[in-house]
Image (spheres, grey):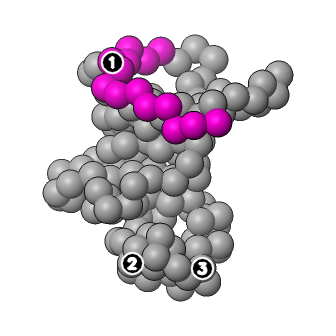
Amino acid sequence: MVANRGGLCNCSRVDVNYAARAFAGAWPSRTGSFADRFNALPKLVASRTLKALAWGPSKLLAEPIEDSVRKAKDTVKGAIYIHGSLALTQNLSKDGLIDEYHLLTYPIVLGEGRRLFGEKQKAELELMSLEDLGSGVVAQKYRVKH
């Protein structure tokens, strides 16, 4: 399971996406080569408010989400990415369900914001790759040491 923060993934290497409810509302109407590939991927959507999904192919996850994720990790072959949900990423990280983090760092200091890792949450990470994308943006991939 890969937590992807700061940008969209390379969808050519993704088999299933976990997506927050906000993605389910925004992406179905988008078109273009990236949007068409992203919309065609199987999606597992975590939501406490949605009862049905019009974004196919997709499946609404049952509570508790952590159990649904464990089941998906056992059955899905290939990469599973999480997009658009800091809370989901934090909860799955606490349960040891995140294997990698793919992060984009932008050269902007806001001075405040939400943390990727909670106040008392610890994670031991190993740098897998680092790439300068230009304009000061840096892509980093980390493996979680379980």
Q: Is mark 3 on a helix, strand or loop?
A: loop
Give, as a single range, the part of the protein colored magenta.
122-135
Amino acid at pointer 3: Arg
Q: Is the magenta stretch mostly helix, strand or loop?
A: strand
In x, y percent, where is residue 64? 44, 51
- The relative height of residue 77 versus residue 146 in the rendered view (above or below) is below
Amino acid at pointer 1: Glu
Task: From the image, tell me which residue sits under label 2.
Answer: 40
In the drawing, does residue 91 fall left or right of residue 81? right
Count neighbours of disc 2 (C-alpha within 10 A) and say few if under 14, some if 14 to 19, many if 20 or more.
some
Q: Give the residue at x 48% y 64%.
A: 45
Q: Give the residue at x 38% y 61%.
A: 11
In the drawing, does residue 116 fall left or right of residue 93? right
Task: From the image, tell me which residue sits under label 1.
Answer: 126
In x, y percent, where is residue 12? 32, 62
Q: What element carries label 2?
A: helix
In x, y percent, where is residue 116? 59, 30
